[in-house]
Image: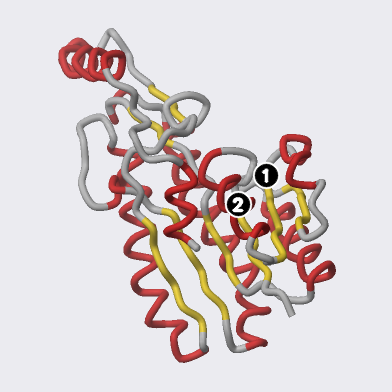
């Protein structure tokens, strides 16, 4: 019987590459995304279920897990891939932006783990893979929110590993560096306030660095998908 992987953020980048790779290798794949229309190419595969999952909508998380179990019977692997980067001086950033960064990168991830754990406990097996980042190991100025969220994922993952091992469930983290995805585009939010002039030299330097060099990098999403697999 084929194993099943549920992937968040599967509409593009690492998530989409992982969905295609697992499907190519005979797995049942639940490719989740905020807008399922973005996964029409994946949905054409017999062993792929494309469904809605928004990390800011707990009901959508629970519904996606229920639909996965109804379609395939098990969830053997959860790949927590969805996330984005919020950057800028902390003092210039509204609390709504701060909370959204942690709601998506951390609390949405936690909600998804909690939703799949009953099934994994019941079968006494499973793997949870949390996509962190090199930014979960080192930090850069103006990355307070993104790095904070990823360091939180790292600590949570390590402790959760020891909590779940006795139940036959493993927790892993993957820490990509720069990857050729849209992280620097729609997955990137930068907040600043020019009136806070003390921060402006650092903001200008960061803007110049981003303009001079792509924030994505030289790894391809398929390279990371292979590591995850």
Pick the residue in front: 44 or 154. Answer: 44
Q: Residues within 10 Å of mark 2 (few under 14, many from 20)?
A: many
Rendered location of residue 156, percent (x, y): 38, 66
User: Which residue matches tag 1?
Assistant: 33
User: Which residue matches tag 2?
Assistant: 8
Rendered location of residue 185, percent (x, y): 48, 24
Q: Which mark is residue 184?
A: none
Rendered location of residue 10, percent (x, y): 62, 46
Residue located at (47% from left, 56% from top): 226
Residue located at (46% from left, 53% from top): 106
Query: Badges 2 and 1: C-beta atoms under 8 Å apart?
Result: yes
Residue 155 versus residue 161 in the image, above or below: above
Residue 67 versus residue 33 in the image, above or below: below
Q: Report whether 109 appears left or right of 199.
A: right
Secondary structure type for disc 2 = loop
Pick the residue in front: 158 or 37. Answer: 37
Rendered location of residue 109, percent (x, y): 52, 56
Point out the tag, 2 or 1, that comes first from the N-terminus. 2
Q: Report whether 77 appears left or right of 151.
A: right
């Amino acid at each position: 019987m084929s194993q099943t992987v549920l992937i968040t953020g599967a509409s593009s980048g690492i998530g989409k590459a992982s969905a295609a790779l697992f499907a190519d290798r005979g797995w049942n794949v639940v490719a989740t995304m905020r807008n399922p229309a973005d996964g029409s190419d994946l949905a054409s595969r017999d062993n792929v279920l494309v469904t809605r999952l928004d990390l800011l909508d707990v009901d959508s998380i629970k519904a996606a897990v229920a639909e996965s179990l109804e379609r395939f019977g098990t969830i053997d692997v959860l790949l927590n891939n969805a996330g984005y980067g919020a950057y800028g001086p902390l003092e210039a950033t509204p609390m709504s932006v701060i909370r959204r960064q942690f709601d998506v990168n951390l609390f949405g991830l936690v909600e998804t783990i909690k939703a799949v754990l009953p099934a994994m406990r019941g079968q006494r097996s499973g793997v949870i893979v949390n996509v962190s980042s090199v930014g979960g190991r080192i930090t850069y100025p103006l990355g307070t929110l993104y790095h904070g969220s990823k360091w939180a994922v790292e600590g949570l993952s390590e402790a959760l590993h020891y909590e779940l091992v006795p139940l036959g469930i493993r927790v892993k983290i993957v820490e990509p560096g720069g990857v050729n995805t849209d992280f620097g585009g729609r997955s990137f939010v930068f907040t600043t306030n020019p009136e806070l002039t003390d921060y402006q030299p650092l903001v200008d330097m960061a803007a110049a660095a981003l303009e001079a060099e792509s924030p994505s990098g030289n790894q391809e999403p398929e390279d990371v998908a292979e590591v995850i697999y």
